[in-house]
Image (cartoon, rainbow, N blue to C red):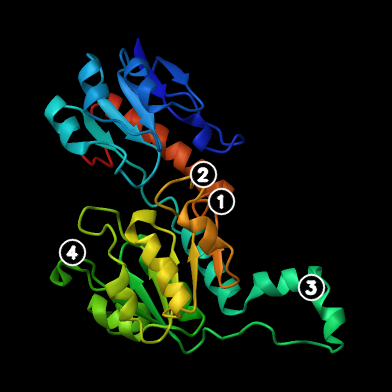
Amino acid sequence: MIRIVFLDRDTLAPETVLRAPSFEAEVECYGHTSADQVAERLADADIAITNKVPIGEVALSASQSLRHVAIAATGYDVVDIEACRRHGISVSNIRAYANDTVPEHTFALILALRRSLVPYRQSVIDGRWEDAGAFCYFDYPIENIAGRRLGIVGDGALGRRVAQIGHAFGMEPVFSSYEGLDERQMQTLFNEDFGSPRYASLEKVLRTSDVITLHCPLMPSTRHMISDEQFAMMEQRPLLINTARGGLVNEAALERALEAGQISGAGFDVVTTEPPGEGHVMHRIALRSNVIVTPHVAWAARDAVQALADQLMENVEAFHAGKPRNLIS
């Protein structure tokens, strides 16, 4: 009997259906798993499923039967890939399930921030409209996005979809490479839709963009890729949007940039520590009227989460059938 252990089933919405595999298997789902429980729970597992619970050398060494780790997400930094290789354990991830939900959330943040929707809403609740004594008031800045440059760091499926939406809004999408990716490796994009592809160095994108949005993986080479030096380059005082990974941005530097007016606002769906603990810098940042922080839900449209769950089980079935897919290792 194949034993499958899902370490953090509660990271999927309660209404999401996780169907049984097509082969005979025992499936055990835990809502949450702490770091000191991982090795015990995977000790006799053949297949492990994790979303955000780290799986490292200790747990891998303790298991005599583990042969595959199925990640219930696209990002795979929670799994020690090199250790899996050493132990002969394959790793799969989820792909192309969030091609609408993350870009739509990205633009929800962009539009809300450019038009100051959150502070205007709160001001109406607080009675400011009556106090103003006029049909409108101008307490917070409002800017269009049409005609503005949209800097996109990362040209994967999500970055491309963001570019399409931005183009529909009349923006000028410009792609950038990021450290660890040679520009010569970047694909030619949107020839049919946009004509010539638009690429620029990261420095040029930072200097010239009105909105900068991050859609690249978290790796050693991209950790804190946006910090004090990069904020100092942002001559257009752009919005900075991050729906990718919290570690891409130095959050202390983000607070300094907001305080100094180097950027006009920020929309973040991701934080270095999730949830951020008491005293975390993002709690202070989130109180600003030109900042929106959401709790890592850009991916969480109902149909997207169900698509993820379906693909997750398809990855497990493919591994069991000897035809593994979406392999990281």
Disc nearest the viewer among 4 and 3:
3
Badge 1 crowding class, 10 Å Cα cut-off, few under 14, some 14 to 19, many 20 or more, is some
Residue plotted at (30% across, 14% down) = 43
**Residue 198 seen from this side:** no
Q: Residue furthest front?
A: 279
The amino acid sitting under disc 4 is: Leu
User: Can residue 266 be seen by looking at this rendering?
Assistant: yes
Which residue appears at 24% of the width and 23% of the height?
A: 58
Q: Nearer the viewer, residue 268 or 159?
A: 268
Secondary structure at badge 3 equals: helix
| Amino acid type, callout 2 | Val
Whether residue 236 is situated above or below residue 258 in the rendered picture: below
Q: Position of residue 20 (x, y in %)?
A: 47, 23
Identify which residue is drawn at 19% across, 31% down. 84
> Any mark on residue 208, and which?
none
Rendered image: mark on residue 301: 1
Residue type at tag 1: Ala
Quarter occupied by residue 192 = bottom left
Quadrant of the rendered image containing residue 123: bottom right
Question: Pointer 1 and pointer 2: residues touching (CB < 8 Å)?
Answer: yes
What is the crowding at mark 4: few (fewer than 14 residues within 10 Å), some, or many (at least 20)? few
Q: Which badge, 1 or 4, is on the more N-terminal residue?
A: 4
Residue 156's spot in the image, x, y percent?
Answer: 31, 62
Tell me the crowding category of disc 3: few under 14, some 14 to 19, or many 20 or more residues within 10 angstroms, Cα based.
Answer: few
On the image, numbered disc 3 is attached to which residue? 124
Q: Amino acid at mark 3?
A: Val
Q: Nearer the viewer, mark 1 or mark 4?
A: 4
Q: Position of residue 95 (x, y in %)?
A: 36, 48
- Dot 1 or dot 3: first in sequence order is 3
